[in-house]
Image (spheres, rainbow, N blue to C red):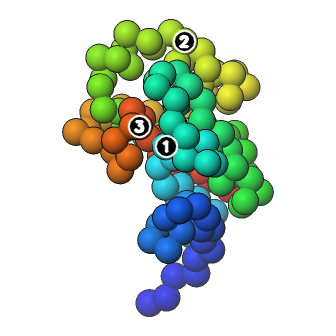
Amino acid sequence: MTIDKKSYRSGPYADFIAKGVQVGNVLYLSGQLGMDDEGNVPEGLLEQVKLAYAGLTQVLGEFGATLDNVVDETFFVTDVEELMANVEPIYTARQEVYGGFPEVAQTVIQIGALVDPRCKIEIKCIAHL
């Protein structure tokens, strides 16, 4: 059985990982790290969250979508206590990027490490087109 897929690849891991894969009207986004296009990673979790959302927004745009299309979101964090200690500014920033209270399912998972040890968060989404 063949599945019709459309994918988008870019960045330093383009040979290994697609940033997004569309199957029918569902878009699966790979986790986005809190780093800029030059690979710089800010120390603060809040700034990393903002950069991860900028990455998600860019990938969604490659498929003609926006954060309004997101239905499921997963935060992978290296320190859930740090996330919870900063929950107000982080979720305020999240509401700002979504343009209001996000109508998405969300999961938060603490993990041992991310692919880049400087990173504290990776955000992965599923969107409906």
| Residue situated furthest right in the rendering | 64
How many numbered tags mark residues here? 3
Residue under pointer 1: 33
Q: Secondary structure at mark 3?
A: loop
Mark 2 → mark 3, Cα distance in angstroms = 18 Å
User: Residue at the location (39% across, 32% down)?
Assistant: 120
Q: Are marks 3 and 1 in contact (CB under 8 Å)?
A: yes
Q: Quadrant of residue 100?
A: top right
| Residue situated furthest bottom in the rendering | 1
Mark 2 → mark 1, Cα distance in angstroms = 18 Å
Q: Which mark is residue 119?
A: 3
The percent coordinates of residue 77 (x first, y second) are 35, 33
Q: Amino acid at mark 3?
A: Cys
Q: Which mark is residue 53?
A: none
Which is more foreground, mark 2 or mark 3? 3
Q: Which numbered disc, 2 or 3, marks the residue that appears first in the sequence?
A: 2
The percent coordinates of residue 36 (x first, y second) are 61, 42
Classify the position of the N terminus by image quarter: bottom left
Q: Nearer the viewer, residue 31 or 108?
A: 31
Q: Secondary structure at mark 1?
A: strand
Q: Secondary structure at mark 2?
A: helix
| 73 horizontally vs 85: left or right | right
Task: Decide: is 49 above or below 52.
Answer: above
Q: Which mark is residue 89?
A: 2
The percent coordinates of residue 45 (x first, y second) are 46, 24
Classify the position of the C terminus by image quarter: bottom right
Residue 55 seen in this snapshot: yes
Q: Quadrant of residue 97?
A: top right
